[in-house]
Each structure stands twice: as structure tokens, then as C-alpha cells.
Amino acid sequence: MPESLPEPGASARPRLRSVITTVLLIMISFMIVRDILVRRWGGSAPPASDVVRPSR
């Protein structure tokens, strides 16, 4: 039995899906790196501590 040939536009969907996935991964990576850089060098005040020190 001969195999059926794929439709002419059948490869467009996986390629579009691949492009969308790549763009989303790049955006997430950029947001993570930006967050790390802002926390390290952009913060004006040190992060609040969970430990409460009694006042004298």
C-alpha cells in the first residue's frame, strides 16, 4: 500500500510552533537575567531580614 504524501502546508504548523517556543524561551531567559541583575546591582536598600532584633 503506498504511503500518503503530506499536505503542502503541513510543515508550516510545526515550524510556527517551534518559532513561538523559541521566542518564549528567549523572553523568559531575558526576564530571569534582568531580575538577577536588578537584584544584585539595582537595589537601593538591602533586602529585609526575617529575623527580628529586639530594640534596646
Image (cartoon, helix red, strand yellow):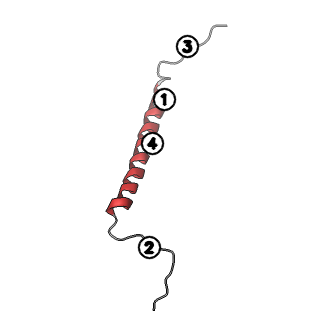
* Residue lying at 45% horizontally and 92% vertically, measured from the top left: 56
Q: Which numbered marker is on residue 25?
A: 4
* Residue lying at 48% horizontally and 34% vertically, measured from the top left: 17
Helix, strand or loop at label 2? It is: loop
Per the image, the residue denoted by label 2 is: 48
Of the image marks 3 and 1, the number of the one nearer the N terminus: 3
Label 1 – label 4 distance at C-alpha: 18 Å
Q: Position of residue 32 (x, y in %)?
A: 42, 51
Label 3 CA crowd tier, 10 Å (few <14, some 14–19, many 20+): few
Q: Which numbered marker is on residue 5?
A: 3
Horizontally, residue 12 falls left or right of residue 41, namely right
Q: Quadrant of residue 39?
A: bottom left
Label 3 sits on what residue type? Leu
Depth check: give the residue in front, 38 or 2: 38
Of the image marks 3 and 2, the number of the one nearer the N terminus: 3
For the N terminus, the quadrant is top right
Circles 2 and 1: CB distance less than 8 Å?
no
Per the image, the residue denoted by label 1 is: 13
Of the image marks 1 and 4, the number of the one nearer the N terminus: 1
Label 4 sits on what residue type? Leu
Label 2 – label 4 distance at C-alpha: 31 Å
Q: Position of residue 45 (x, y in %)?
A: 35, 71
Of the image marks 4 and 3, the number of the one nearer the N terminus: 3
Q: Quadrant of residue 42?
A: bottom left
Helix, strand or loop at label 3? It is: loop
Label 2 sits on what residue type? Ala
Does residue 23 sit above or below 10 in this rendering?
Answer: below
Label 1 CA crowd tier, 10 Å (few <14, some 14–19, many 20+): few
Q: Position of residue 38 (x, y in %)?
A: 35, 59
